[in-house]
Amino acid sequence: MADQVRFRDLQYRLAAHIRDPEKHAAPADIEERRLAIYRELFFNNVSGLLAGTYPVLYEILGQSVWHTLIRDYFSRHQSHTPYFLEIPRDFLEYLENDRTPNQADPPFMLELAHYEWIELALSVDEAEPDLEGVDRDGDLMEGIPMVSPLVRVLSYRYPVHRIGPDYQPTKPPGEATWLVVFRDLHDSVGFLHINQVTARLIELARDGVRTGRQILGEIATEMGHQRPERVLEGGRDILKMLHEKAIILGAGKQIQKGQHHGKAE
């Protein structure tokens, strides 16, 4: 039992040293050359994974600032996931909740990080579109547009899809940026810049209970549009475009009164 306690204590001290070698001394009797290998291996693996998930943020911050950021995450954040692919989400939680903001941080930092993370999140999402009962070539106006479960409608203060080394806004524009991120039927992740009306259409369609015509009629009413037929005409084209990208999978049958229909989420 005593040997187990000593071994566990050794593991904790070694882990603390690897995470933050400046604050935690290495356990005695371990060769420095080997310690250096462990320190570099762990740090470089995590840093490389995160740089690959957040390439724009990495390029904007630069290598020196990035390494300081990752060292802070590595040393301070208590990660509980045993899965390598969940580390990027864990890092995002660190940025949102644990990290002390720096005056030099880009004002769009958190939004950009979330935008970059969502691509990985959708690429590994285990959900699969259920095409049973969906007419891929059905009438999206008279039938029920069925939204893929691999669709995320996002709103940001900053135009994160445009941000890069050559475009770094210092304050948000007057209007929010609406984006839809999706994984198509070939497992490719795509991004689409949309407006608030299209975002509302997708969100209403998620219920899987209204026809395309009913959805667009509701949107026209919400807008107080003087010519609702124009909303229907424009909406028909939007539905077609969303269908081509597999954001909308096709048309389901209209539900009879009293019949239950599961949500397409």
Image: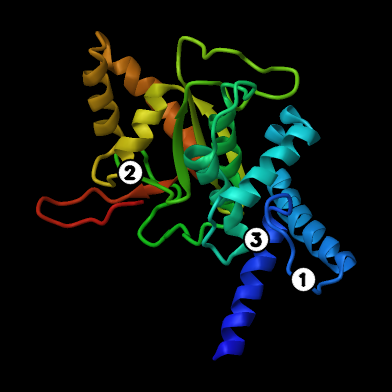
Q: Earlier in the sequence, mark 3 or mark 2?
A: 3
- Give the CA separation, mark 1 to mark 2: 59 Å
Q: Earlier in the sequence, mark 3 or mark 1?
A: 3
- Give the CA separation, mark 3 to mark 2: 46 Å
Q: Which residue is mark 3?
A: 16
Looking at the rendered structure, the kind of residue marked 3 is Ala
Let me know if residue 141 appears in the view.
no
Query: Which picture quadrant has residue 4?
Result: bottom right
Q: Is residue 95 left or right of residue 18?
A: left
Q: Earlier in the sequence, mark 1 or mark 2?
A: 1
179, 72: nearer the viewer = 72
**Looking at the picture, how far across and down is residue 82, in whole percent?**
57, 67
Q: Which residue is outermost to the bottom?
A: 1
Q: Is residue 241 left or right of residue 190?
A: left
Q: Nearer the viewer, mark 3 or mark 2?
A: 3
Q: Find out whether the residues at labels 3 and 1 contact each other: C-beta distance under 8 Å.
A: no
Looking at the rendered structure, the kind of residue marked 2 is Arg
Q: Residue at x 47, y 34 (%)?
A: 240
Q: Residue at x 34, y 36 (%)?
A: 203
Q: Which residue is mark 2?
A: 206
Query: Which picture quadrant has residue 110?
Result: top right
Q: Is residue 34 left or right of residue 153?
A: right
- Give the CA separation, mark 3 to mark 1: 14 Å
Q: Which residue is mark 1?
A: 28
